[in-house]
Amino acid sequence: MILIDGSAGEGGGQILRSSLALSALTGQPFRIEKIRAGRSRPGLLRQHLTALQAAAAVCGGKYSDGTGLGVQELEFYPGKVRAGTFEFAVGTAGSAMLVFQTVLLPLLGADEPSRLIITGGTHNPLSPPFEFVASAYLPLLRRMGADVDVKLIRYGFAPAGGGRIVAEIKPSRKLMPIDLSERGEQQEVFAEAFFSNIPFGVAERELAEVGTHLRLSPADRRVREVKSDGPGNVVMVTVASEQVTEVFTAFGRRSVSAEDVAREAANKAARYIASNAAVGPYLADQLLLPLSLAGAGCFTTGAPTPHTLTNAETIKKFLTVRPVFEQHDGAGLVTVRLGMRSA
């Protein structure tokens, strides 16, 4: 049985989610201790418990008796991944997108197509929003051979939640390597301000600020009023290039001005545009697992985040391939390649 320290490195819920996906994919059971031990609310929250239940459902797996909210250790025993129609409800504004990502790669290895229906948060801080998954992550996964389609049925902002996504996943037995050494020529940059149950003027101010910082024309500033169970607001900057599309976000919140929220998103995008990296910090984190399953591939990024480094260490526990980080002196770039784990 593989032993996982849930407090290692970044110490967040990603360690559990990656372990669940890898366990389902490889058939190796694991025990995880100190789950989210360093967080203000340690142990399993609703989204982590839902991810655990979802992983068990898609592979016929079992986990420790008595596992529930707040639990900081558990054992997981995977079975065989099976296709089907699965419906999961986080029950709070916890991220539906993270639950989706937990079971997506295992379901690619099923014998038949699967359908996922997940309710919860679709747009919440500290989690990838729907547009990031749909526009940045999934297109690259499709280039690797995956056949996945996901639709946003209803927006779910924190703290109300209530969002809903539906995904169709067809079998893809083997992911193919991908080379993202360069992003290619920039094709488009545009900003969007999504809002629900807050004044329209907030979104207008955000887009005006982003437009000033990134020198966007009025046509490249798009206001999106959406329906959700509660108030919410997010600013997104999409940078589309030949080889990769990146999405950078900032969420509106109390006591933070519209201008400050807009500058947060604009600054993230500006740093990426000014760099030579093909992949931004969040997408780098997401790509590690599918590239590791492909057994090869590479991408350039900036300095790896604690999330990325922690994810790499988790992958090494389950697979014989390992992410290798190659620093480019003076260039501010890191190339991430896949190598074989030494005996």
Image: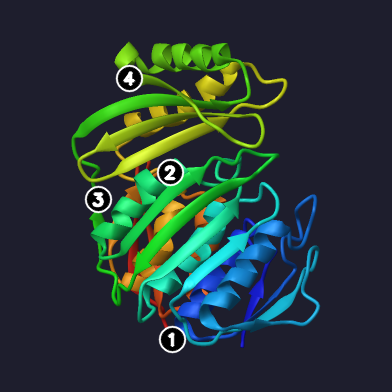
Query: Residue beneath label 1, please?
Result: 343
* Cβ atoms under marks 4 and 2 closer than 8 Å: no
State how far apart marks 4 and 3 are (Cα). Answer: 28 Å
Label 3: which residue? Answer: 181
On the rendered structure, is 315 left or right of 38?
Answer: left
Quote the CA–CA distance across marks 1 and 4. Answer: 52 Å
Mark 1 or mark 2: whose residue is earlier in sequence: 2
- Residue type for callout 4: Asp
Foreground disc of the pair 3, 1: 3
Local crowd size for mark 1, using a 10 Å CA cut-off: few (<14), some (14–19), many (≥20): few
Q: In the rendered structure, which disc, 4 or 2, sits on the residue that comes first in sequence?
A: 2
The N terminus lies in quadrant = bottom right
Vertical order, 55 against 272 (above or below): below
Report x, y in % for residue 297: 28, 63
Q: What element carries label 3?
A: loop
Amino acid type, mark 3: Ser
Q: Can residue 129 be seen in this view?
A: no
Image position, residue 88 (x, y; %): 60, 63
Would you say the residues marked 2 and 3 are in contact, meaning their CB atoms lie under 8 Å apart? no
- Seen in the picture, residue 120 relative to 235 is either above or below; the reply is below
Find disc 4 in the rendering and name its residue: 220
Q: In this view, does 150 lie above or below 132?
A: below
Q: Residue 132 carries which label?
A: 2
What residue is rendered at 56% in x and 60% in y? 99
Residue 163: x and y in percent read 58, 45
Q: Distance between the residues labelled 2 and 3?
A: 20 Å
